[in-house]
Image: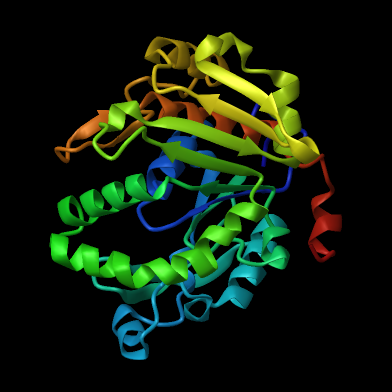
Amino acid sequence: MSDLQGDAPRHLPFVLGIVGDSGSGKSTVARGVRELIGPARVSTLELDDYHRYSRAERQELGLTPLNPLVHNLALMQEHLQLLRRGRPVRNRSYDHTDGSFGPMRTLEPEEVVLARGLLGFPTDELRSVYDLAVFLYPEPDLLFRWKLRRDTKSRGYTEAEVLKSIARHLVDSKLYVLPQADRADLVVRYEIPDWEAPDTEVATTLILRRAAADAVRSDGIHSLGAHVAMEDGEGGDLTVRVASTLPREVVDAWGRDRFPETYDQAAFGTYQDEAGEEGHLVPLAFTEILIADLTQKLRRPTESLANAAGSAV
């Protein structure tokens, strides 16, 4: 395996977690990050594959997919540790169309292992397996809007079915999903000024911690101008505020500078708009570029694959 920015030295896989509530934009952001890094360099681990029960079984038990009891967290951690050491894993697949399980499949770790799902780091022990933990945290009104839009326009649910699902999930979201934000290296907050505001007025606040904060602070994003503000917080945290008015051409220039071989301005910051068509959000493109850039900067130091394979994480 080669470094993301060139050939040798060799690195172990970088484990990136993109976690958030249902409808928070995990698939959208993960797709953008994967395309920036290069699809051939990224293995995607679907954390929903670690469900213990099918959708029908969950309904019989009265459990939502947000409850940790639904997930085989021990197997998830074991597989993440194996992937982190460069070892393949096998697991059955979860089918979102009918909530059933598919055949067993093998995942080979590439340079980056991108783990995506509802519960990626619900415990400190699981959190320790990730090199970069990202939590997507739209404010409630926006999350409601995006989930309702996705499930009715893309997944075939009625509005009444989605509203019932949201109501049933609220308690478990507060108990189990949202607390993961406290363990994340990067928390992405999407915000709108009021309920009537269109998606084009979405602003983004990013809270960076630990090495992620240091990487952005030392590298700087000052070239993006007054529409992006950085503010130091307590304990070394860094807050980055991205205005909805950030010009698209500024972000495109930044993306081309960081990823000259893979950046395509038409492919990043794309999402499903109010009409169910493909739209573009500049703060979303900014977030995708930042996560991919951090993935490059935070690669673990060169290690001996043989030594690492023989040691526990």
Residue 189: in sight, yes or no?
Answer: yes
Query: Taking 257 as reference, is 156 left or right?
Result: left
Q: How is the image coloured?
A: rainbow
Q: Nearer the viewer, residue 124 or 241?
A: 241
Q: Residue at x 54, y 11 (%)?
A: 226
Q: Quadrant of residue 202?
A: top left
Q: Residue at x 37, y 89 (%)?
A: 61
Query: In this rendering, is residue 221 above or below 118?
Result: above
Labels in figure, total: 0
Q: Position of residue 286 (x, y in %)?
A: 48, 26
Whether residue 236 sits left or right of residue 181 in the image: it is right
Name of the residue lying farthest toward the bottom? 60
On the question of residue 157 being in view, the answer is no
In percent of width and height, residue 199 lies at: 29, 32
Considering depth in this image, is 8 or 69 the residue closer to the camera?
69
Q: Residue at x 33, y 72 (%)?
A: 168
State whether residue 147 is above or below residue 5: below
Q: Position of residue 290 (x, y in %)?
A: 56, 30
At x 43%, y 57%, the residue is 21
User: Residue lying furthest front in this view?
Assistant: 194
The N terminus, quarter of image: top right
Tell me which corner region of the image, top left, top right, bottom left or bottom right, holds residue 66: bottom left
In percent of width and height, residue 308 lies at 82, 57
